[in-house]
Image (cartoon, rainbow, N blue to C red):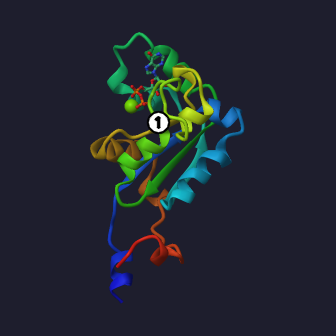
């Protein structure tokens, strides 16, 4: 019974997006699999071509950087896979699974370390903190697009 109570407790969520290069290169399954195998729970997923307004809001903190226009051009250039993943410590853990921003400096074993070369084509985005995660989840998703569900094997991931 204690296990069931724990399973129903709210936990952390993060926003992850496979960028247009990851989609074009056929890396969706490879990337999804890494988060699934780690043991995080997928609670929202959709494919969309982001509007310029959405992309500019998403990357608003980089508005004054020289690469901003190119970044917005790139992220709006084709379909993106937008996701919300849930689990204890998922925000920081996802950043570790993703690896450093510059793929040539990302550790082997990370998504960028294994699958990318160029900083402007680094295949994936992940929220950099809890506040950012909340902002990005609300920016990309309606609450009705997120599903609360309980994996049948949850007791094998989280101890009671
Ligand atoms: P992050 O994606 O690891 O959080 P940020 O510093 O937040 O990295 O930068 C956001 C995105 O902007 C990066 O993932 C990358 O696609 C792009 N970017 C960052 N710095 C550069 C740069 O110097 N040149 C080109 N693109 C960059
Ligand atoms: Mg960032």
Instruction: Look at the numbered disc 1 and give the secondary structure of its residue.
Output: loop
**Residue 42 location (% of width, % of height):** 51, 59
Asked where in the image residue 159 lies, by quadrant, the reply is bottom left
| Residue at (59, 40) in percent of width and height | 48
| Residue at (49, 57) in percent of width and height | 145
Q: From the viewer's perspective, is 68 left or right of 35?
A: left
Asked where in the image residue 160 lies, by quadrant, the reply is bottom left
State the residue lying farthest toward the front: 108
Residue 88, placed above or below residue 136:
below
Residue topped by disc 1? 99
**Residue 100 location (% of width, % of height):** 44, 31
Residue sitting nearer the eye, 31 or 58: 31
| Residue at (52, 26) in percent of width and height | 103
Residue sitting nearer the eye, 111 or 120: 111
Residue 73, placed above or below residue 40:
above
Q: Answer with the quadrant where ligand 2 appears in the image.
A: top left
User: What is the crowding at mark 1: few (fewer than 14 residues within 10 Å), some, or many (at least 20)?
Assistant: many
| Residue at (34, 55) in percent of width and height | 89
């Amino acid at each position: 019974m204690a296990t069931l109570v724990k399973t129903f407790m709210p936990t952390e969520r993060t926003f992850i997006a496979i960028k247009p290069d990851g989609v074009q290169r056929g890396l969706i399954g490879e990337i999804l699999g890494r988060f699934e195998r780690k043991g995080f729970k997928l609670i929202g997923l959709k494919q969309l071509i982001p509007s310029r307004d959405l992309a500019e809001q998403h990357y608003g903190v980089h508005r004054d950087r020289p690469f901003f226009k190119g970044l917005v051009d790139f992220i709006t250039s084709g379909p993106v896979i937008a996701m919300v993943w849930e689990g204890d410590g998922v925000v920081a853990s996802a950043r570790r699974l993703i690896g450093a921003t510059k793929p040539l400096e990302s550790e082997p074993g990370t998504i960028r370390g294994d699958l990318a070369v160029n900083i402007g084509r680094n295949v994936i985005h992940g929220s950099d903190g809890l506040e950012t995660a909340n902002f990005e989840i609300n920016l990309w998703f309606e609450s009705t697009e997120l599903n609360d569900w309980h994996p049948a094997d949850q007791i094998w991931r989280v101890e009671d």
